[in-house]
Amino acid sequence: MKRLGIAALISVSVATAAFGQRFLLGDQSGYEPTLHNIPYDGRFTFARIKYTPCCGFMGYYYRGLPGWAHGYVPDPRRGSGRAEDNLLKIMNEVTYLNAHLDGSVVVGFDDPLLMKYPVAYMAEPGFWTINDKEAAGLHAYLKKGGFLILDDFRHDGDPRAGGGWDAMESNLRRALPEGQIVPLEASMKVFDSFFTIPSFDVIPQDYDRDRPEFFGIFEDNDPQKRLMVVINYSTDVSNFWEFSATGLRPIDESNEAYKLGVNYILYGLTH
């Protein structure tokens, strides 16, 4: 791959509008974005998990969007695109996946439609809430071969920075009480399913504190078996997908974030 790399495959448009506290926190009156789900036809479609955020208006702190929709609604002030659209453009350039580029699907864990999508993504799991029906749906999804990506949350601290680990862990335990959350290593298959990621040191940090960490839950708690859940902690990988065409971050960093996303999708489809 030439130096411009995979991120340069997306058309470049630079937006440099400044943003302040109101931009980050919104007007403290969140809203649910309009969904534009495309019909299922068997082709790979990006599936994003919808949930009811916790913590009052803090679950809607960014532009008034619920936590699950971060990256789903483009930001016209900074010229961003939808995170999933940009990722799937890359997928179709470097693989034969032939994924849908004309939309995605937003679905809850309690919706039987989820079973049609082998890979699912969730943003801001620190703000995630779950009820009994959703917990049962997530349990069934994972046990039947589903692969869940949790992304965009960080160490507890300033609540404006997002939700924390405890909410995510308690929800996973409701759905999969026997599951053990364990640290992942760069040598594991998920990080070598298409691109080789030699070390987590190459994974870029966006705006969060500390170094990115990666955790997961394996089938039967056996690292030699299928990884069912991957957890990107103390980082926001999808932010690089969303803003890769804006010049906000270096191309080399966006490349590494795309490599991670490509690996996750291909791992989920083949395991």
Image (tube, helix red, strand yellow):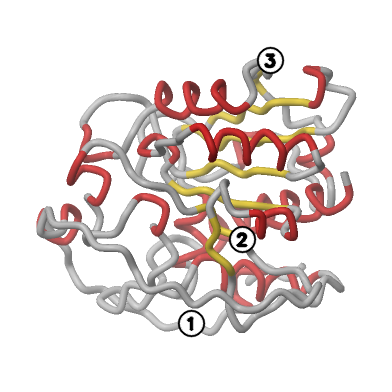
Q: Residue at position x 56%, y 34% from top?
A: 135
The three-letter amino acid code for the residue at tag 3 is Glu
The three-letter amino acid code for the residue at tag 1 is Val
C-alpha span from label 2 to label 1: 25 Å
Q: First in sequence: mark 2 or mark 1?
A: 1
- Spot occupied by residue 54 in the image (x, y as percentages of width and height): 30, 38
The circle on residue 12 is 1
Q: Are marks 1 and 3 in contact (CB under 8 Å)?
A: no
Q: Secondary structure at mark 1?
A: loop
C-alpha span from label 3 to label 2: 25 Å
* Quadrant of the rendered image containing residue 161: top left
Residue at image mark 2: 47
Residue at image mark 3: 178
Q: Are marks 2 and 1 in contact (CB under 8 Å)?
A: no
69 is higher (above) or lower (below) than 247: above
Q: Which class describes the residues within 10 Å of circle 3: few (<14), some (14-19), or many (20+)?
A: few
Between circles 3 and 2, the one closer to the viewer is 3
Between circles 2 and 1, the one closer to the viewer is 2
Q: Residue furthest front?
A: 133
The three-letter amino acid code for the residue at tag 2 is Ala
Q: Which class describes the residues within 10 Å of circle 2: few (<14), some (14-19), or many (20+)?
A: many
- Spot occupied by residue 158 in the image (x, y as percentages of width and height): 21, 31
Name the foreground residue: 67 vs 205: 67
